[in-house]
Amino acid sequence: MKSGRMFFWGLTTLVLLALTTANAAQDKRAIILGFDGIEPTIASAMMDKGELPNLAKLRESGQFEPLQSSNPPQSPTAWSDFATCRAPLNHGIYDFLRRDPKTYIPSPGFGSVKQPSFTPDGILQKAPQFVNYRQGDTFWKVGSAQGLRVKALGIPFAYPADALPEGSSELCGLDVRDIRGTQSTYFAFSEDFSAKEEDVAGGVHLQLAFTGNTATAEVPGLRSPKDRQLVRVPMSFEVDRAAKTVKISVQGQSAALKEGAWSPWLEWSFAVTPQYTVRAISRFHCMEAGTKVRIYMTCLQYHPREPMIPFSAPPAYSGELADRYGLFKTIGWTCDTKALEKDDMTEDMFLEDARQTMAWYEHLTLDEIDRGNFDLLAAGWTEPDRVSHMFWRFRDPKHPLYTEEGAKKYGRVVEDTYITMDRIVGEVTQRLKPGDLLMILSDHGFHSFHTGFSVNTWLIRNGYLVVKGQPDQATAVNDNKYLVDFKSGDSYYDWSKSKAYGLGLGMIFLNLQGREGQGIVAPAEAPALLANLRTQLLAVTEPKSGEKIFEEIATNVNPQGAATLEAPDIQLGYADGYQTDKNSAAGAAPKDLFSPNDSKWSGEHASSGQAITPGIFFSNRKLRTKPGLRDLGVTALDYLGAKPDAAFEGATLLEKQTPATTK
């Protein structure tokens, strides 16, 4: 009888303990804020000057230190590390490009759009979809499967949205495409354009030919499956040059714009077949409307109420947000860097658009926090990274585009995005409850990019890569991109004599037997070849300055993991100021080994040394030191009482308490 009572009381105690633990867990929330591309040395200096008061408070009361980035420290890789809590050898994302080793043909590195299929009479058989090459579940999906209510808002390179249970939601960010399937294809209209229509890098130029005060244009959308021709929608422009205004009309809608003004979002319908129509949204900016007319238009973005490819979970969530706030920017590449590079957007336009975008995501995040009903919330902003890429030229006197005048006007716009970040952090901390864990990260830091290095030219000069028909390694060049002619399949290089080639922002691949389609390097030869390449590359210096251009170089000898086929054999790690020349990154081999970077894309990190490119990490409580990107998701799950996936490689940052022993 006594033992029965003891069993009953013991069982009751266990039940009460379990209920207490469950109730405690319900009082806990984990909130993660991610800001792409924050440089820790700048953030530290600004905190010391009192310019980031909210982050400074976290530094004092909680934790601040550099956050180990991925290798390479570029956004697709780093955010995949963060989301899957895995290393690249297991999630498979190494660069913005990947190659088919059998054909040497490159393709986008993170994922691609799979086109729709139709019946002969134009009825949609299979809807378009985005195919993600990343392997491994996100930590928020793992948590939701264990009953956690999660909200994932704008996390880069987490697309398409996870299939989440009821009560959880996700809005995809960076890598959501436009309806043309590109990262972002903008449109520019001008009287100065000589051709009626011209494709440029990242955009389309459309000529405005006014008859009196009116001009028309046809905007090309996506292709018809019947004849592969672009489906076009007509629009008109009516200018009042004296008032400096333009009235834009399309499909029954109109917007009157003054110089320097943005339009509201306008809606588009592209009849791909008589039975299948794709809807889109875009907005315009009037750059000039006096002596001449110049108009910028964003890319044709998914309509949030009827997206061509869903980009939220549940799929109706994007439409719900449109009902809440009105139409909103849905493209993942939120800032139009190509338009700024081509002077189809001004610096001030770019910055204004970046501010508006940060503000929208701030409003969304704070609204979702206020609404509650979550255990885990993660939100991301990419605008600090884009501003840094485009305006670093005004921070570095060594950059070819640096000017004192520009530095006076734009020399602190990077800091301005940090101040916005700090204000967002302050708004979030005001909403924290006593049991909340707050973690703040950036995926990597930042460096100048004033000089480009042609990897493939170096490989040619040193006898590792041979251009077809040009046997003299001292003079051989290849101005063709992408290693192979896409139409014919013919290679620009002689693979029967080539041992290594470069592709992407910092990758070198061996022409390995059994892996590459025309490989000549025996597997037994590979380790010694990699060691020699590493030694030679580490010794490379820039002739004028005498500086070593590489901080570190990693080799993958017999890599182990779930996604090793895509792994480069060598990952370059550049020193500050240096990166792979953009033509070489695409597979070309220009004449000059070194070239000044005369692009507005003047800041970089993508192939910088991992050790010198950490991000930032803040927490509102003391956690374990030396955090890495793969640790944050594990930490959030651990804090909320959920188990990490067995494949996760990160470790919890929570300090484990040693249970007291009883005597």
Image (cartoon, rainbow, N blue to C red):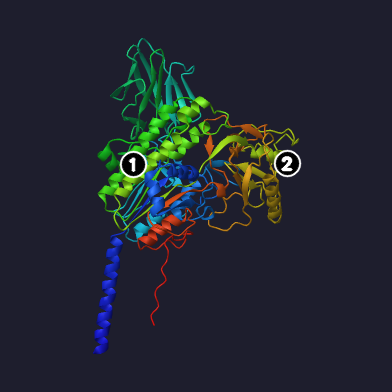
How packed mark 2 is, by other alpha carbons closer than 10 Å (few <14, some 14-19, many 20 or more), is some
Q: Quadrant of the N terminus?
A: bottom left
Q: Relative to 473, is 264 on the left or the right? A: left
Q: Residue at x 67, y 32 (%)?
A: 592
Task: Tell me where residue 596 appears, x and y as whole percent.
Answer: 61, 31
Secondary element type, mark 1? helix
Q: Amino acid at mark 1?
A: Glu
The relative height of residue 466 versus residue 289 in the rendered view (above or below) is below
Task: Tell me where residue 303 appears, x and y as whole percent.
Answer: 33, 36
Q: Which residue is mark 2?
A: 462
Task: Tell me where residue 517 appears, x and y as whole percent.
Answer: 64, 47
The residue most toward the top is 212
The relative height of residue 381 versus residue 300 in the rendered view (above or below) is below
Q: Which residue is mark 1?
A: 362
Residue 129: name its quadrant.
top left
**Viewer-side label of 2, 1:** 1
Query: In the drawing, what numbered circle is on residue 272?
Result: none
Secondary element type, mark 2? loop
Name the foreground residue: 126 vs 291: 291
Q: Amino acid at mark 2?
A: Asn
Name the foreground residue: 328 vs 103: 328
Task: Tell me where residue 363 appears, x and y as whole percent.
Answer: 31, 41
